[in-house]
Image: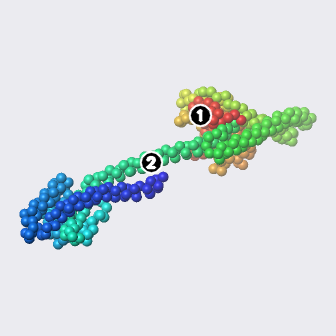
Amino acid sequence: MAGVLLALGFPLAASLAAAHQQAVVVDRIDDTARFAAIAQNVTETGSVFKKLPGGESGSGVDERRATLESELARYHEVYGIEAGVFHRDGTVMAAAPGGWRIPEQGEVRRAFGEALLGRRFHDPPQVWPWQPGARLAVASPVVRDGDVVAVVVTDSPTGQLRSRILSGWLLLAAGEAAAMLLAVGAAFRLTGWVLKPVRVLDAATHDIATGRLNSRVAPAGGPPELRRLARSFNEMADHVEDVLEQQRAFVADASHQLRNPLAALLLRIELLALELPEGNEEIASVRTEGKRLATVLDDLLDLALAEHAAADLRLVDIGELAAERVAAWRPLAEEKGVRLTGSGPAAVTAWADPVALSSALDAVIDNALKFTPEGEEVTVDVAARGDTSTIVVADRGPGLTDGELERVGDRFWRSGRHQNVKGSGLGLSICQALLAAGGGSLGYAHNEPGGLRVTVSVPRAAPAADPAPAAHGAG
């Protein structure tokens, strides 16, 4: 639109300036024609300097010449335009002001030369607003018996003409600016209509990515292609939710179905141990592996339940909750020779499921105590930053490499350096699932100069109401 306006604006501005100048030129032509008619009366009886033989006396010619001079003087006085009637040789018949003469060069001389050839000078150069010294010269021939005997010349100032051109240009610019604003407004409306379903789709995608699998997009509004995309997105979300639900159901059912035979197997191992010598290493190894398998099944069941259960969100004083968990874990820390300390403001509130948050914090503190050597310290710091409240658990253990930081929290993943440490590799995954149900998250980073820093983040703002049907729908 800007290109079109510029492409049309410049020729239109030039045409506007030419029209204003043409109107002035037409007025000057009319003026010079009137003076030429008066001058013709002066010259038609012969030379103005001689007595006319057998006819009118020289005094009559002088009267006509005086009339011409009077008209020119009044014209100059009223309009400020220099005007004069000149013989073919350039000498003055009458002029106003009295000392005005044809210059040796310039537009006035050009106009005078054109008129001597019997043509009115109709094509003066275009005057532009940025030419303060520009003049407008117009000339008309005085013809007698088919011959040019004199020339009427006017030399006009262009101040008013340049002002009118500039005013016209300003109006033109204002019109183009208004057209541009209208085009911008139309573009915003059009892009808003096109992008609104994209923004709704983006919000629904974010909801699904953060665990709200029942989010859907209403396929209404926007271009047909985006409506089809919304329907396809809903079909994909339904399929993904079904697959994940089947996966969760399978994990929960498998864990539950395996627990009974495993419990029976462990019972028979205990009975078998009674028949063998005490301290049998094989029986001890089988018992340990069986208990480890039971732990893994319990964790799998907990993970399936955590991913499926809805969060019971309420306003929680996480400072008080963190202090309780630190006090609960301190005896174990002292037993291991590790200092466990907590710090932070007295009251830091956030919206969270207190049971889920306690479970997640227990798992993180337990992890920190496992890997922190004797004599070192584990700190639990509570803080509020903007829209988020955080609990940061930092240890002085061996920490993780950059590559391991990218994988920590994945199911069943454990660092190759810590395979001998008790655990199933599902604890942090369960924490993440518990927190995600309430809008929380876990973050991992290096703890300088050594160790791991785990950040538990929960929102401070109240949970939003269910989105309107126009944006989402229940799965």
Q: Is mark 2 on a helix, strand or loop?
A: helix
Name the amino acid, label 1: Pro
Q: Distance from label 1 to label 2 (Cα)?
A: 47 Å
- Residue 32 relative to residue 265: left or right: left
Residue 451: x and y in percent read 62, 44
Q: Mark 1 — residue? A: 459
Q: Which residue is drawn at 30% across and 52% down?
A: 164
Q: Which residue is drawn at 10% across and 60% down?
A: 63
Q: Inspect the image, locate mark 2, and give the three-letter code of the amino acid beneath it.
A: Ala
Would you place residue 233 above or below residue 357 in this image?
A: below
Q: In this view, does 299 lie to the left or right of 78?
A: right
Please report whichever mark, 1 or 2, sits nearer to the chain's N-terminal start: 2
Quadrant of the rendered image containing residue 356: top right
Q: In this view, does 44 lie to the left or right of 444?
A: left
User: Which residue shows up at 57% across the image and 43% down it?
Assistant: 193
* Disc 1, SS: strand
Disc 2 crowd, CA 10 A, few/some/many (<14, 14-19, 20+): some
| Residue sitting farthest toward the front | 54
Residue shown at 60% from the left, 45% from the top = 446
Count numbered badges in the picture.
2
* Residue density around tag 1, few if under 14, some if 14–19, many if 20 or more, within 10 Å: many
Residue 474 position within the rendered picture, expressed as x and y whole percent measured from the top left:
69, 34
| Quarter-of-image position of residue 282 | top right
Asked whether the viewer can see residue 268, the reply is yes
Q: Name the residue under label 2.
A: 179
The mark lying in front, picked from 1 and 2, is: 2
